[in-house]
Amino acid sequence: MTRLREKAAPYLLALPAWIWLGIFFVVPIIGLLWMSLMTGNIITGFQQTFNVAIYPEVISAYWEQILRSLGYGVSATLLCIAVGYPVAYWIAFHGGAHKTTYLLLVLLPFFVTQVLRTISWKFLLADDGVVLGPLKAVGLLPEDARVLSTTLAVVVGLAYNFLPFMILPIYAVLEQVDHRVVEAAYDLYASRFHAFVHVVLPLSLPGVFAGVLLVFVPSSADYVNASVLGGTNNTMIGNIIQSQYLVNNAYPTAAAITFVLMTILLVGIFSYAKALGTERVMEVQAG
Amino acid sequence: MSKNRPPAPALLRGLTRARYSRRDTFRLAGLSAAALALAGCGVEGQGQSHSDMTEYWEGRKSNGKVRFANWPLYMDPEKPELKRFTEQTGIEVEYHESIQDMPSWFGEIQPLLANGDDIGADLMVISNGQELTKLMALGYLAPLNREYLSNFTEFADEYHTMSAYDYGNKYTVPYASGITGIAYNPERTGREITSVKDLWDPAFKGRVGMMADPQEIANFGMFYKGISPDDSGVDDWKAAAEALKKQRDDGIVRAYYEQDYIQPLVNGDIWLTMAWSGDIYQVNAEEGSNLKFVIPEEGGTLWTDNMTIPITAQNPVDAIMLMDFLYAPDIAASLTEYINYICPVPHAKEVLLDRASELSGEEKEELEGLANSPLVFPSDSDYARLHNYKVLDVEAGEDKEFNSIFQAITQA
């Protein structure tokens, strides 16, 4: 009896997670797959016809937007690492008594909704606005230079919006790094650079790994940044899904694109995890 | 800024005048008969018949309350018109600014209506366009009973009673209309803008804004090609798309905008853009900007936001009474003073001018300006230059083809 209970305990503890996943992930995902195979329209209704042809159709119609979204996602993620890592490092090692305050400052913009934050970039980066105006006035930028309505604006907007998701996990890992390990490196005549590359960086990889997932996935699927900050030819796959769903009421098409995007992201994440090796990451953490 | 002013005494006097509120029973009876005859013609093909209408309204009574779902900034925050309605009828109005844009509103109410559930509103303002066509085709709107619409029958102008999307007002009654034309900043463009062709001018490379809405952008593509959108077909759409594609690929278009073209225009990011008439009137009044709005020589489009009753409304009688109440010229004038879009009640102009004559100075000038603005009370010759939207046959799936042609331009 006791043994049975002992055996069942972990499963019982995992039960809420399973129920949560079941209700909010498995059921909708099956519904989505089911929906994607239907044909019809909103007026006559949708019937299940197992129309698998929709998949090659949406891929050939939207491969460009899919690739573009992945490209933007990768760029935004790299930008987040470039900006976020030093911030996390500084807070973890030089934040002193005010670490929590600095973390709060990182999170502060998140108290404002994403749409508003993104729209405020339009004021900041207007062609003759507070940033570009003076630069043009002193001749550092040509008169017709612009940031808004360009690819750059979309990628920077994405990076800005998801930056805390990179900073927080990296910070959480760096915070745990035992300073004595770093000191040991110095004792063994490692330069600051070598101590970082051979000790701190490997120890922080699990954080970077988590940050990459947290930034790459939502930024590849985002649609707000492209529609607010983008111009022509900046449409991301999220925008397509949104307009297929809301404007066209083409629910099967929207479902099929969603499924394709999800599959690509999942495959990408698994190969990324395999390449970087979650197990190795775990080992590093344990060691 | 005229719109947040409390109602002036002159207006309150105007509201109590009997001039427009007296009912001419005999004339009304005749007109409703004519309207019913029109409704019976069944222009829409699958529209509901007269008997559906009588069946719907049979035995329904006023419940003393009505829930009104509208767009933001479409009524004075003080709601003087609704207070007036409650005073006169005893019907309480719950007013919600719950409609942000048509696609998401449709997405929100469609599943409820499909189940026959209450959507939390008895009266809602729906723009003419694909969503309205779908709501009508799906039978989600209550057929209107003309017996309740005496003010509308008497005071609405003919442009608002003979629309292409709901000829004879079987399901819809206009709330306000607007014109899609071109807005521009004359200081930036350095010249007057008069034609749709200006939106294709390489001199404005990267400085042109176009609308993302498939129908709006399609209309302008067709104007450019000399096609009238009202009776266009697939070949016309493709020709228009070709022109729009060139405009995009030549780098002339900066971005495709939803409703967010105003700020870039004020900031100078774009110099000229497709725009809605009332927006420009409002932004000039609020920000002191000097933007201009023109109906291009090739034409502009007239769009209308309509009051409709969802088929699952809990208080349809109260809703239709409010609908009609807003057509009393005094009330329509008061609404127009706040919203600055085209008023479907021509008599409201007289009310506004009467009021202006009792004012002085800047206030007088402002009100006269509004009453005489062709963007608020267009003349017959203005109307002659305005086109209707193409009404797409949603049952035949025409909207699918149309959208895919134009979304390929805006969502590349």
Image: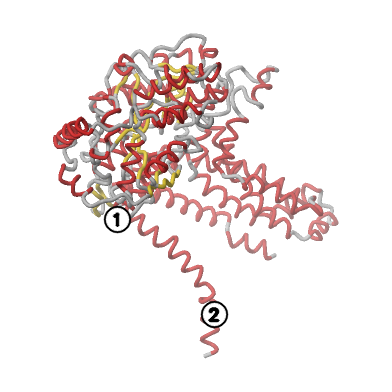
For the residues labelled 2 and 1, the Cα–Cα distance comes to: 43 Å
- Residue at horizontal 55 percent and vertical 84 percent from the top: A6
Give the percent coordinates (x, y) of residue B100: 44, 40
Image position of A27 (left or right of B169): right
Residue A25 visible, this angle: yes
Quadrant containing the C terminus of chain A is: bottom right
Q: In this view, does B241 lie above or below A246?
A: above
Q: What amino acid does circle 2 point to?
A: Ala
Give the percent coordinates (x, y) of residue A216: 54, 47
**How dense is the environment of label 2, judged by Cα within 10 Å: few (below 14), some, or many (20 and up)?**
few
Decide which of B121, A123 is in the foreground and name it: B121
Q: Element under label 1?
A: loop
The chain to which mark 1 is attached is B
Image position of A53 (left or right of A90): left
Residue receiving disc 1? B115
- Residue at horizontal 17 percent and vertical 41 percent from the top: B46
Mark drawn on residue A9: 2
- Residue at horizontal 25 percent and vertical 34 percent from the top: B169
> Is label 2 in contact with label 1 (beta carbons under 8 Å)?
no
Q: In this view, does B237 lie above or below A95?
A: above
Q: Element under label 2?
A: helix
Give the percent coordinates (x, y) of residue A163: 62, 45
Q: What amino acid does circle 1 point to?
A: Asn
Q: Is residue A123 above or below residue A108?
A: above
The chain to which mark 2 is attached is A
